[in-house]
Image (cartoon, rainbow, N blue to C red):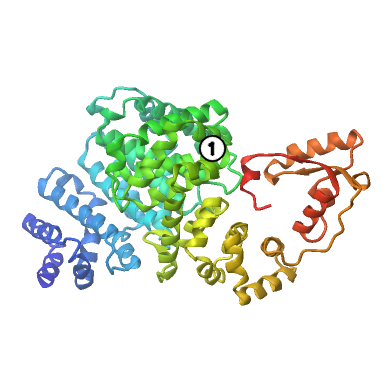
Amino acid sequence: MEKKFEELAGELNNCPLSVDILQQISLILKEQDSECLCSFVHKSYESLLVVERWVWKVLSSDYYGEWINDEYYQEFFYTVASFNKDLIFNNGDVKVDTKGSLLFCVSIDQMNEIFAKLDRSTDDNNPFINIISLWLDNYSYFLYDNRQYNIPSVIDYIGRHITVKYFMSKQYKLYLTELRQPHLIQSVFTAKFLFYIKTCSFYLYTYLFISIRSSNSPYTADEMIRYLYEDYLEIIHVHSYNVMSWNKELLGCIAQLVGLMGVLCWWDGQQRTQLKILFSKEQTTCDHVEDLTRIVAHTPFYKQTKPVRSNYETILMDTILMILLVIVQTQNINWLFRSNTTIRDTIISVSEAALNDEVCLCGYCLLGEALGDDLLKDLKIADNISDYFLNMIQEAWKNSSNKYKPIPLEYLLRGFQALSKNDSIQQRTASSNKIPLFIEMSEQYPILYDIIWALSFNHDIQQQLHSNSLFMSKLSHLAQQGGNEQMRKITHGILWNLEINHQDRSISQNTNQNTFHIMISYSHKEKVLCKQLYDELTKSGYRVWIDFDQMHGNVMDAMAQAIDQSEIIIICMSEHYRQSNY
């Protein structure tokens, strides 16, 4: 078969080209199921490269009008696109670089020609638009699942072009306005409409996702959210009430819009000033959480998730949970998740029923951050969450790529870091005897020290740490080094919990001799507010201990001494305070 395929590929540049050649190539590609696809790619790589290059040559050619309405040509392009999608999601031994070299064999000049043809088209249902959409969708699928891939310049070019030419355009805005209507007839979803709202949104959020730390984008997150947020909030609100009547086109559009908004919410690191635009009022945030919950609660959606992110249902579940997680981490409305049993139960159902690991992972992170110790214990899901994370972390560590399927180990560790402060998670980790694994991993992933610090509040884990003399010696050594202040604080924190390196201090028996009237204990996220409190108290004549004014030496010892020497402790309780190791 490989020899036959090579001969057929060699015929593609003949003029005139017989459609029989296209039919035979299509037939061979359709025969490649998941079991034989890898072998076929290895044996026929050069011939496949000829086919892929020929496709881009034809799509960008001046004579595309001669074939665009030919059913055999259309069938051929759809078949190659389907083959490429199967290749992207095949977990066999085809290397990522091999997949990328087959997919990204288009030049910037060819893409310029293709975009020009799209812009000149007066037929909103031109088959050419559908074909280009399939290819760009495949690019988005590949790039999202291979975030470390060294992308070629043409991908950056496409991303910037889509951002400027299509996303920030009057046409995109016009289509968003149409999408705000509650009852949409099928004719609304033209090929051009879907290209703008579904394909361009999909490509843009994938492009932003892989370049999230770079400054390549021609617009800031603030600018893009300001442009999008009013339409986005209204579209989600309106259609959350008619979710049972969604067609596949509406599902695809909303899945990609939510994904785009999710990436824009993650953008710009820890500051996330753009969230103040999207969620200017607490009521807006609460309403949006309830809208998203109505969508995610639709059973057919989360029942149709797949292990790979290859359908709209899986993308929708993943992106909605991503936005909900951002909200929990930034908006101080955990009370809503704790008080609203519908929201809580929906997320539990999705997390436990979805077949996609990223969906489950995001759902469990959301539950761990939002619910707190008591609710997790009452709902009896802490063990499931802990086992799920620990298994994925261990499997990713054993994998040469340090990934669990497409999920990087760093992402898993960041998720577990947030959960590690939970009492039930700590106890399950102790019972699972995973401390030796974490110690081994800490050489390569320093975030493990912060995780171990959180876990070291548990008595059983304290004993496990004490039993590892080599690690204890290493902690003592790190605590004495001055190069990395954050690491020094973390190791001091671990050693403090293990009752090592406590400074001797005499506790005054006479409270009248205490140094301070008041100690303020707070999270640094609330530093501005607590500084105002400190200023007012000191103006009134109180002696106040607060870390930015009185912190000296070992943080844990200084705080313990401040507690001993203060008559009153003011605790500025918040979600950030609850989650802090201090």
Please report the residue visible at 49 percent of the width from the left and 44 percent of the height from the top: 376
Residue picked out by circle 1: 223
Across and down, in percent, residue 92 comes to 27, 66
Of residues 347 and 150, the one nearer the viewer is 347
Residue 332 position (above or below residue 397): above
Of residues 444 and 566, the one nearer the viewer is 566
Camera sees residue 330:
yes
Across and down, in percent, residue 114 comes to 30, 48
Residue at the far bottom: name it: 470
Crowdedness of circle 1 by 10 Å Cα count: few (<14), some, many (20+)?
few
Residue 333 position (above or below residue 354): above
Residue kind at label 1, given as amino acid type: Glu
Query: Left or right: 465 with respect to 192?
Result: right
Residue 492 position (above or below residue 577): below
Please report the residue visible at 65 percent of the width from the left and 53 percent of the height from the top: 581
Residue at the far front: name it: 509
Query: Left or right: 327 with respect to 202?
Result: right
Q: Secondary structure at mark 1?
A: helix
Please report the residue visible at 28 percent of the width from the left and 46 percent of the height from the top: 311
Identify the image quadrant of the N terminus: bottom left
Across and down, in percent, residue 97 comes to 35, 67
Across and down, in percent, residue 532 comes to 79, 36
Camera sees residue 196:
no
The quarter of the displayed image where residue 451 is located: bottom right
